[in-house]
Amino acid sequence: MFIGSGSDYVYVIDAQSGRVRLRFKTYSSVYGVPAVMGRTALFASLNGYVHAVDGNARNWPGEYEIIPYWTQLWTFRLPLPAPPLPSGFLWQVRVGGVVRSSPAIAGNVLYIGADNNLVAIDLQTRQGLWWFPTEGPVQSSPAIAGNTVYVGSEDGYLYAVDAVAGKKLWQFATEGKITSSPTVADGTVYIGSHDGKMYAIE
């Protein structure tokens, strides 16, 4: 299991024993749910980064106690090798200033809310493909159905966006901000709003 926390760590936990197999330090809270591809977890931290972590990795003894001192000594140009990357680190990419959304993956593309945008990231090149702007923060986690990405915004709208081009297909207004995540089933999109209503949109 991959679990984010407000303690600035993501934890990899053995589902049978409940033992922590890896702690990965993000230096910022993780409010979203990681997306998992095999043994790789993809998740966003509040400070605007998407991280990729190897779930097969293990911390070495005293890693997070020793690394700060190692880094300090290396910074003072003492004859030491550069401090290693955190155990489990594969890569990271900055997608915005503040991220509370969870990533959704289709093919080789990751979609996530960041600041006031819905963002698409190519997982092979780790480059941004497009940014779709809204008029409010996007805490909602995107849902993907076919070639369309659905996401809510605190501006009160549910947006349908072309997954390839990043262009708006349509928008639906509610009477309150949207922080919940849409669900798509049988051609209908379901979303809750702060106006106290649940919406079903065909």
Image (cartoon, helix red, strand yellow):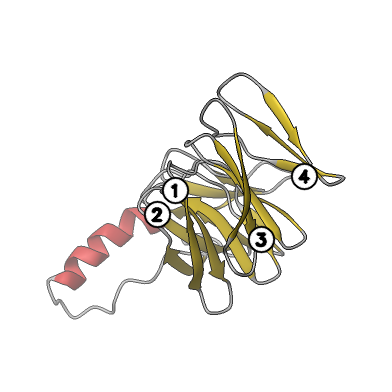
Identify the residue under disc 2: 48
Q: Earlier in the sequence, mark 1 or mark 3?
A: 1
Amino acid type at mark 3: Ile
Which x, y percent locates residue 163?
65, 63
Q: Is residue 77 left or right of residue 111?
A: left
Identify the residue under disc 4: 184
The structure residue drawn at horizontal position 43% and vertical position 42%, both measured from the top left corner, is: 137
Q: Mark 3, mark 4: which one is toward the viewer?
A: 4
The extreme top residue here reads 196
Q: Earlier in the sequence, mark 2 or mark 3?
A: 2
For residue 60, say whether it is visible.
Answer: yes
Query: CB atoms at circles 3 and 4 under 8 Å apart?
Result: no
Identify the residue under disc 3: 105
The structure residue drawn at horizontal position 15% and vertical position 76%, both measured from the top left corner, is: 78
Q: Label 3: how many residues lie within 10 Å, few (<14), some (14-19) or many (20+)? A: some
Q: Earlier in the sequence, mark 2 or mark 4?
A: 2
Identify the residue under disc 1: 99
Q: Quadrant of residue 79?
A: bottom left
Q: Between marks 2 and 3, how big is the CA–CA gap?
A: 18 Å
Query: CB atoms at circles 2 and 1 under 8 Å apart?
Result: yes
At mark 1, the secondary structure is loop
Which x, y percent locates residue 170?
63, 50
At mark 2, the secondary structure is loop
Q: Quadrant of residue 32?
A: top right
> Measured along the vertical axis of the image, is residue 39 above or below residue 192?
below
Q: Between marks 3 and 4, how big is the CA–CA gap?
A: 15 Å
At mark 3, the secondary structure is strand
The extreme left residue here reads 76
Q: Mark 4, mark 1: which one is toward the viewer?
A: 4
Q: Quadrant of residue 36?
A: bottom right
Amino acid type at mark 1: Val
